[in-house]
Image (tube, grey):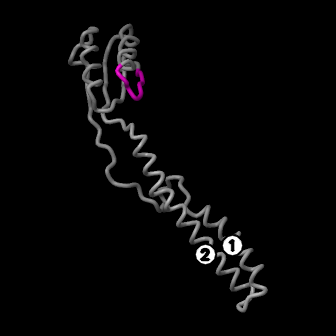
Amino acid sequence: MQVFSTFEHSNYLELAIMELEKAGVKKERIFAVPLTNRKVERRIFDSTHNSDGVSLISTGAALGTALSVIGASVGFSLKWGPIYWGLIGAGGGFLSGFLIDLFVYKVIKKRQRLLRGKNSQVILIVECEDQQADLAESILWHHLALGIARVQN
């Protein structure tokens, strides 16, 4: 049985490895792999082949529609007329909605991701007998593993 777990790089990882060794798992059967986390910011604009599910135009489309209706309505009494003011309202609304979404995604969501901050940094692979798997899993959970999975050999 193989037990896979992810940890932050901390003393709890070392304590988990020591406790696994005390529980009878040989040192040769424990394998720790450090991960390289993403250092480059994710791209904001999607391409044809890659999409992250974040839409920067939805708020812009809604605000553009609302402001174009308001601009066309008010434009009847203004000098340039309803068509020009409707187009100005649509462009201004779309641009302001796009900038709002961009600000929210770049500043607020980034700050929330940094505050959450629990990134997996090490994968620990423990190869053990079937009867030791429950004990190994409880040891890993006790030492603050972020996630655990079992694979039958």
Residue 127 image-quadrant placement: top left
With respect to residue 98, does 70 lie above or below?
A: below
Depth check: 30 or 80 in front? 80
Question: Which mark sits nearer the N-terminus, 2 or 1?
Answer: 1
The residue where tag 1 is placed is 67
Residue 148 image-quadrant placement: top left
Q: At numbered mark 1, what does the secondary structure look like: helix, strand or loop? A: helix
**Amino acid, disc 2:** Gly
Residue at 34% in and 11% down? 129
Q: Given contact means CB atoms under 8 Å apart, are the residues at marks 2 and 1 in contact?
A: yes
The residue where tag 2 is placed is 92
- Residue 85 belongs to magenta span: no
- Residue 147 belongs to magenta span: yes
Residue at 40% in and 29% down? 146
With respect to residue 132, does 52 lie above or below?
A: below
Residue neighbourhood size for the residue with mark 1, other residues' Cα within 10 Å, grouped as few (<14), some (14–19), many (≥20)? many
